[in-house]
Image (cartoon, grey):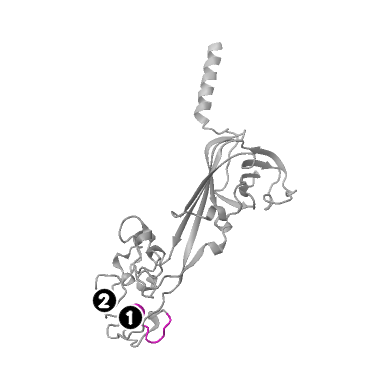
């Protein structure tokens, strides 16, 4: 009997070790991937669930407001590490409520409707917060294909030398006709290899500052109205806009470029490392990504004003 008991004990231990990768099996942090945020003088990132009612939250006291983690560096990335402590906390809570109220975090007075059964707090570990900013001029050309010199650096491709790299420039050639309006991708396959080339000079219209090759810059062919839009200046309707009519060479020098808006997308992700909540522990927990609705709409666009030359 001792031998049988000993063998069973060893088998049980092996089975436990094989299954136990840091998690206690009767507790599972099963939450949606997206989290919300609130607070000032300390941010709380949190997510909740029902059936059963639970919450998982990370509080970082060093962060004053959301802009702290939306301020990215030259590489459009923010990344920082915070040690869990008495002021930087990871909490897993269970509740007796069947449905949790919406405002259980970041209130001066805790919501009395939320009845906590258990509150587990990690006393060690660390949190990594990373924000990646993606900007786009929405000109119909994928940003990666605006790397004209092929060096992997999108910031040094500026066809019109207006101070705005092509991937953020809605008018890449500075002719005051927006790139998206110069038919840069006729077959719609997200590749400008078939871009319109009106004068057949080997330069697509969206990169050509003289689209009809008549010796007059497209931006200067504003004969009917000087509004930084050569597309609405049409002497001969049978041919089309003057900037595409080589027979029209009337010149009205432009004095400025068109300002335009770009879109900005922030992806905020959090991972929590090497923590123990008593009932469950992890080497790495993917806390998820910030719900886009938490980011103010005025941060999602920016108006760029090109430098005229």
Please tell me which residue is depicted at 44% across the width and 55% down the height of the picture.
Answer: 74
**Disc ID at residue 243:** 1
Q: Position of residue 121 (x, y in %)?
A: 64, 38
In the depicted view, which residue is nearer to us: 4 or 212? 212
Residue lying farthest top? Answer: 2
Q: Chief secondary structure of the magenta span?
A: loop
**Disc ID at residue 199:** 2
Please tell me which residue is depicted at 60% across the width and 54% down the height of the picture.
Answer: 65
Total tally of numbered discs in the picture: 2
Position of 229 relative to 294 (above/below): below
Q: Is residue 220 magenta?
A: yes
- Is 264 placed left or right of 206 in the picture? right
Q: Position of residue 73 (x, y in %)?
A: 47, 54
Please tell me which residue is depicted at 70% across the width and 51% down the height of the picture.
Answer: 107
Q: Is residue 85 visible?
A: yes
- Is 219 placed left or right of 52 in the picture? left
Q: Is residue 77 magenta?
A: no
Q: Position of residue 254 (x, y in %)?
A: 38, 80
Position of 90 relative to 1 (above/below): below
Considering the numbered disc 1 on the image, is that residue within a helix, a strand or a loop? helix
Q: Mark 1 or mark 2, which is nearer the start of the sequence?
A: 2
Residue stretch in magenta: 218-227
The local crowd at label 1, few if under 14, some if 14 to 19, many if 20 or more residues have their Cα within 10 Å, is many
Image quarter of residue 140: bottom left
């Amino acid at each position: 009997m001792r031998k049988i008991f000993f063998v069973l004990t060893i088998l049980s231990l092996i089975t436990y070790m094989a299954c136990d990768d840091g998690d206690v099996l009767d507790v599972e942090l099963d939450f949606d991937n997206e989290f919300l945020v609130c607070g000032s003088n300390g941010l709380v990132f949190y997510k909740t669930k029902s059936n059963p009612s639970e919450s998982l939250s990370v509080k970082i006291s060093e962060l004053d407001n959301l802009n702290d983690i939306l301020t990215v560096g030259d590489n459009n990335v923010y990344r920082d590490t915070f040690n869990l402590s008495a002021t930087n906390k990871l909490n897993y809570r269970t509740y007796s409520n069947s449905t949790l109220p919406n405002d259980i975090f970041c209130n001066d007075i805790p919501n009395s409707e939320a009845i906590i059964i258990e509150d587990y707090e990690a006393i060690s570990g660390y949190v990594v917060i990373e924000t990646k900013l993606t900007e786009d001029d929405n000109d119909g050309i994928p940003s990666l294909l605006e790397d004209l010199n092929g060096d992997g650096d999108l910031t040094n491709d500026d066809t019109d030398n207006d101070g705005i790299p092509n991937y953020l420039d809605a008018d890449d050639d500075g002719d005051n006709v927006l790139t998206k309006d110069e038919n840069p991708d006729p077959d719609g396959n997200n590749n400008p290899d078939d871009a319109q080339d009106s004068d057949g000079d080997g330069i697509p219209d969206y990169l050509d500052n003289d689209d009809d090759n008549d010796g007059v810059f497209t931006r200067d062919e504003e004969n009917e109205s000087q509004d930084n839009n050569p597309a609405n200046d049409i002497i001969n309707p049978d041919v089309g806009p003057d900037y595409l009519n080589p027979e029209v060479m009337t010149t009205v020098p432009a004095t400025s470029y068109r300002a335009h808006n770009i879109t900005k997308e922030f992806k905020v992700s959090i991972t929590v490392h090497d923590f123990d909540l008593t009932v469950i522990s992890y080497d790495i927990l993917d806390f998820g990504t910030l719900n886009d609705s938490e980011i103010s709409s005025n941060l999602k666009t920016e108006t760029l004003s090109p430098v005229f030359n």
